[in-house]
Amino acid sequence: MASTHRAPIEEHPDLMGLRARHDRAATTPRAQMIEALALLAGLYIAASPWICGFLGATQLAVTNLIAGIAYMLLLGGLGSSYERTHSMAWAAAVIGIWTCVAPWVVAGDVAHTRSITSNLIAGAVATLIALAAAFTHYRTGHGTDSHADDGRTMAQGRYDR
């Protein structure tokens, strides 16, 4: 009986290539800029009731505070851990859309010019940033399946399917 050596899954060339592509995407100035803009957008959404003066609309103020913090948490690690955060950008885009419609959806009389203007602009910017984060890996990898060139291949018998 011939024994076959199975390498750990972490050493599979496809997985190593995917990790390398994600690492390249995380270190680009574009990804770092998107992360910085996302943090600023989330911070603005969270602080907008105090900045724009619609703190009297308590339900909307709490909604914006929670949405802004959630947005920052979802996109905050884009530059440092792209592999784990780029798919969360879609949830961040939903938060951006929610921010746009919140003045009309939140209970109470909260749809005033300040809250509407602030939420529409901040929500649209947040949505665009989240979409840019979601599509960052397409711009860096262009769909190529580059494998880590470490001399090990499936043909050499190191990796079994």
Image (tube, rainbow, N blue to C red):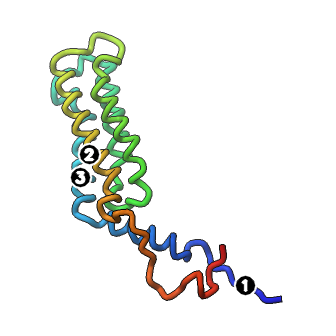
- Mark 1 or mark 3: which comes first in sequence? 1
Give the distance between the C-alpha atoms of the residues marked 1 and 3, in whole angstroms. Answer: 48 Å
Residue 42 screen position, x and y as percent: 27, 40
- 2 or 3: tag closer to the N-terminus: 3
- Which part of the image, by quadrant, shows the C terminus? bottom right
Q: Is 54 in front, or is 149?
A: 149
- Identify the amino acid type marked 1: Thr
The reply to whether callout 1 and callout 3 are in contact (CB within 8 Å) is: no
In terms of image quadrants, where is residue 47?
Answer: top left
Q: In this view, does 45 lie above or below 73?
A: above
Picture quarter containing residue 32? Answer: bottom left
Q: What is the number of the mark on residue 56?
A: none
Percent position of residue 153, x then y:
55, 83
Separation of residues labelled 2 and 1 (CA atoms): 48 Å
| Residue in view at x 21 percent, y 22 percent | 115
Q: Which label is found at residue 129?
A: 2
* Horizontal side of residue 65 vs 83, given as left or right: left
Determine crowd level at label 3: few under 14, some 14-19, many 20+ residues with C-alpha closer than 10 A: some
Q: Where is residue 81 in the image (x, y as percent from the top left)?
A: 39, 61
* SS assignment at label 2: helix
Closer to viewer: mark 2 or mark 3: 2
Disc 2: CA contacts within 10 A as few (<14), some (14-19) or many (>=20): many
Q: How far apart are marks 2 and 3 (CA)?
A: 10 Å
**Contact, mark 2 vs mark 1 (Cβ under 8 Å):** no
At 18% from the left and 28% from the top, the residue drawn is 118
- Taking the image as shown, residue 12 lies to the left or right of residue 21, namely right
Mark 1: give few (<14), some (14-19) or many (20+) Cα within 10 Å. few
Residue to which mark 3 is pinned: 36
Residue 10 vs 32, above or below: the answer is: below
Question: Which residue is disc 1 drawn over?
Answer: 4
Q: What element carries label 3?
A: helix
